[in-house]
Image (cartoon, grey):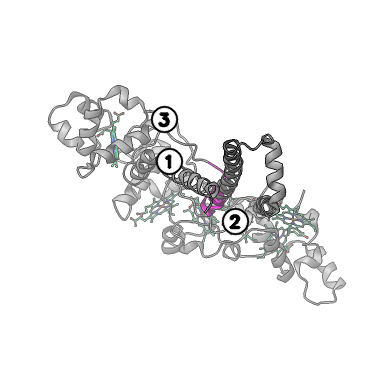
Amino acid sequence: MSILSRCYLSAFVIFLTLFFSVQPCISQDSEAGANLFKTNCASCHYLGPEEKKLIGPGLSDEIFEEYTQEWLYSWIRNSSEMIESGDKQAIAIYEEYNKAVMTAFPYFSDSDIDNILAYIKEGPVEEVITAVESAESIDGSGQNENLLYIVLALVLFNTVLLIYVKNILKDAAGIERIGFIGSALSWLKLNPSFIIFFSVLVVFSGMKGCWNSISKIGVAQHYQPEQPIAFSHQLHAGEQGIDCNYCHHSARESKHSGIPSANVCMNCHTYINEGRSEEGTKEINKIYAALGFDPNSKTYIPGYEQKPIEWVRIHNLPDLAYFNHSQHVNVAGLDCQTCHGPVEEMDVAYQYSKLTMGWCINCHRETELDTDNPYYHDLHDKWIDKYHGEEITVDMIGGRECAKCHY
Ligand code: HEC
Ligand code: HEC
Ligand code: HEC
Ligand code: HEC
Ligand code: HEC
Ligand code: HEC
């Protein structure tokens, strides 16, 4: 091996090692904290200002002004113990929250608590993102792109390094050097394979970008975001047999199907205060928290500022496409399940179909028109005449015309 390639190789290895060892430690603490917080605290605490109440107060960096580190450690490990020991601050917050008892976490290590506190300190990262964006990040295509940039950066870095080292060696040997750009060009001339490699990479990454944007909606298939309340269709629409229309009645009458407001939930949950488990009861309590309802006295707290439950949207066509529920549910007489799959078996709802243009058009090609329905009588008679009684599919009446689906 020549001196040159040895220099080159060791620099490459050093760079790689540095790169990968620095990477993971950037946000480890608050990431571990985020997981701990979500599994242990999020059912009772929002991340945010104290007024943003759930079962307990919202948690933000305010708590570090109010309490010492030590106080927080003991509180999180066992708040009841502190209250019994007569700690003034502990009693005050306990009274303020109507003596609701916070779960104890005696098994948490110091570093567990440090991580959670680091996460609280950092505050919420914007979590209400659109369905399509988050589906992409779930899909992991973002990560692949990062990898591509890393490879590109590495290639560039190495080229510059190579030229630099070569120049130093030339200096040492007393050979005249021809400037940075000049030597870069002459190096490239001697190494045409590099140009090919580089161009292929660029073209490939460009193509991948295009592909991602075209297939955006398809990527969202199986998208299953975590919802603010663990509402189960399996329990409500399946086991309890509640009709889809009870909650999504506008699917029959309008373009949108809509998500029921918390008041619809209260038709039943005014009386059903308990879930199947402690977890279930906590989830039901979140409906009350949104509306300011006190399940013990069965009254609404006067002057409470009600806030809508922020369900995360699952299905989302791009604006350029027009889709109308009533046309499909009412006029065509299709079951919800044809497009949404076995929703009554889903504990957590997800997107069942692709929702791509190809998906819409395929169905229009294959599906026969229901000419017995009470809508469009005259039109139907006209079509039956026109096609002499052969089966009429949606595309025969224009279900493949661009303007029907695109404004
Ligand atoms: C079962 C619900 C519940 C869970 C789970 C829970 N808390 Fe609490 N937390 C409360 C309640 C309620 C209060 C208000 C005091 C009281 O009534 O005991 C509170 C108070 C606090 C306070 C004091 C805040 C202030 O502004 O005074 C901190 C800090 C805190 N919790 C941290 C945590 C952390 C960290 C976790 C997770 C490891 C957690 N809590 C899990 C219910 C809960
Ligand atoms: C008790 C009320 C209730 C009933 C009954 C119900 N749903 Fe829902 N549905 C909801 C709520 C609340 C959401 C939003 C939370 C979620 O996505 O789980 C939702 C979400 C959905 C979504 C996803 C919406 C989106 O964000 O894109 C679909 C699709 C859906 N329901 C279809 C159905 C079908 C089909 C049935 C009948 C088999 C049904 N629902 C019965 C309350 C109900
Ligand atoms: C038609 C009546 C009805 C409506 C409307 C209704 N629920 Fe329920 N819900 C029930 C029944 C029944 C249970 C089961 C209670 C049990 O078995 O302990 C339940 C249980 C729950 C549970 C606890 C699940 C568990 O694991 O224990 C949650 C959370 C819940 N519902 C949320 C909602 C939300 C959110 C809405 C409004 C979008 C809603 N419900 C609307 C009847 C209803
Ligand atoms: C022909 C296919 C099809 C049928 C049948 C259908 N849906 Fe949808 N549904 C869709 C599409 C496509 C979207 C996305 C619409 C958008 O983003 O504009 C959607 C969205 C939804 C949403 C999200 C909120 C909204 O309005 O965008 C709910 C809830 C929903 N559907 C419930 C139902 C229910 C309940 C039924 C049965 C009564 C039903 N759907 C029947 C295709 C269908
Ligand atoms: C499961 C099959 C099915 C799927 C999937 C489907 N459609 Fe349809 N669509 C129908 C049927 C059946 C009709 C005919 C209704 C009628 O009798 O007028 C129809 C009619 C239409 C019409 C009216 C056509 C006309 O000539 O009047 C539009 C617009 C439309 N669909 C848009 C969409 C879009 C956009 C999607 C995809 C997001 C979609 N459809 C997915 C079955 C489907
Ligand atoms: C049955 C409904 C339907 C018909 C007919 C239809 N489209 Fe679409 N189209 C859609 C839907 C839904 C989307 C969004 C889904 C997607 O991006 O894959 C879409 C997306 C597109 C897009 C954007 C793709 C992107 O990058 O997001 C273009 C361009 C397009 N359609 C062109 C056409 C043309 C041209 C025609 C007529 C030959 C046509 N469409 C007919 C439903 C339809």
Q: What separation in Å lies between label 2 and label 3 (alpha carbons)?
A: 41 Å
Name the spot of residue 159 as percent of width and height, x first. 61, 44
* Disc 1 residue lies near ligand 1 with CB under 8 A: no
Quadrant hosting residue 78:
top left
Report the disc number at residue 304. Answer: 3
* Callout 2 secondary element: helix
Closer to the eye: label 2 or 3: 2
Q: Residues within 10 Å of mark 2 (few under 14, many from 20)?
A: many
Q: Is residue 56 above or below residue 208?
A: above
Does residue 332 appear left or right of residue 311 in this picture? right
SS assignment at label 3: loop
User: Is 160 inside the magenta-drawn segment?
Assistant: no
Residue at mark 1 to residue at mark 3: CA–CA distance: 48 Å
SS for tag 1?
helix
* Membership of 139 in magenta stretch: yes
x and y percentages locating residue 307 in the rendered image: 47, 35
Disc 2 designates what residue? 219
Residue neighbourhood size for the residue with mark 1, other residues' Cα within 10 Å, grouped as few (<14), some (14–19), many (≥20)? few
Mark earlier in primary sequence (2, 3): 2
Q: Residues within 10 Å of mark 3 (few under 14, many from 20)?
A: few
Which residue bears the numbered disc 1?
A: 22
Precedes in sequence: disc 1 or disc 2: 1
Q: What residue sits 21% from the left and 38% below the top?
A: 77
The residue depicted at 83 percent of the width and 68 percent of the height is 383
